Image (cartoon, rainbow, N blue to C red):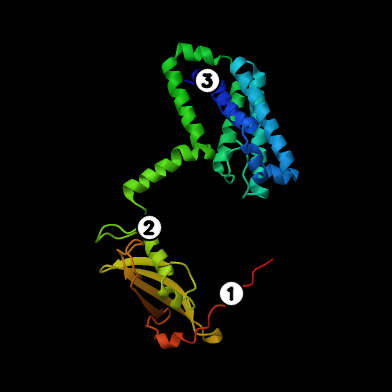
Amino acid sequence: MLSLTTSLAPLVLAALLGWTGAVKVFSRGTAQLAPKTVLARMLRSSERATTVLRATGAGELLIAAGLLVVPANPVPGAAVAALGAGFLAYLGYGRAMAPESSCGCSASEDTRITWRAFARAAVVLIGGATVAVAQGTWWSAVSERPGGALLFLAGAAAVLVALSADLDRWWLLPLRRTRLRVFGHPLLGTAAGNQVPVAASVELLENSLAWQAAAPVVRSALLDHWEDDGWRILQYSGVYGDRENARPVAVVFALDATTGRDSGGDPIVRVSYVDADSGEAVAVDELNAVPSRRNLPMAG
């Protein structure tokens, strides 16, 4: 299996580099994507970034041709390894300096730099190092073990597709749509009597009038939740009173555990305030003196 892997690695890398290189060189989207890449920030010019992307694509096409024609020669493999190392360094810089930018690795990927980009660059680096020391040719491996070669190439293709964010629209998005059609949206209500996820209850609560009324008291995100006799109880922490008279309080909301976004109408919400120290209920009129939280000024 190891010899089959090393023999077929040039074919896999050639397909990857041939695809990314062709997109960079021949696609009109290269110029459109360039301003959104880390390169544009590094070079301080969208035009220069476009030029570098197209030059990189041409180099990838040249290396891909070398992998196909002379796979046993160490030069193409070493070039691939150097390319992978360069990609990793570039991605590291981009992640640190401009994490919101695209890497432009395939010139059609308008997404932020994620672990998948690093993983694909690592595959290029390791694959190039493997090819540089390999002795066999991919055509010999295919002719000698066609079944094993087919399985290996299919698995390698699946891995590369999974690591390519710009191919998500061909497989990941349809898969997610199918999951939603089969299992339903996680934040939508289900059949009568079935409880919706806690996230759905929290979303409904935080868009309700009850939440707006209690907002001056609430000081935390959701701390705890449980179900009781068909009600979903959501607990938050809060503060009532002012300055030296401020006291901690538990803010407890209760709403129908089966109510979802598709239920229609405003949800029925019950609100209770419990003194955190004494455990006694706090009267609503005691909370009227709670000052509204002032908005913090925006910087800039």
* Amino acid type at image mark 3: Leu
Choose top left, top right, bottom left or bottom right for residue 111: top right
Q: Residues within 10 Å of mark 2 (few under 14, many from 20)?
A: some
Residue 172 higher or lower than 10, as above or below: below
Q: Indicate the secondary structure of the residue bearing disc 1.
A: loop
Direction from residue 55 to residue 112 in the image, left or right: left
What residue is pinned by disc 2?
187
Between the C-alphas of marks 2 and 3, the distance is 46 Å
| Label whose residue precedes the other's in the sequence (2 or 3) | 3
Determine the CA span between mark 3 and mark 1. Answer: 61 Å
Residue at screen point 49% across, 18% down = 4
Residue 257: name its quadrant: bottom left
**Marks 3 and 1: which is nearer the front?**
1
At numbered mark 2, what does the secondary structure look like: helix, strand or loop? loop
- Nearer-N-terminus badge (3/1): 3
Looking at the rendered structure, the kind of residue marked 1 is Asn
- Give x and y (percent) for residue 237: 45, 73
Q: Is residue 9 above or below residue 176?
A: above
The residue that mark 1 highlights is 295
Residue 164 x/y as whole percent: 53, 37
CB under 8 Å between callouts 2 and 3? no
* Discs 2, 1 touching: Cβ within 8 Å: no
Residue annotated with mark 3 = 8
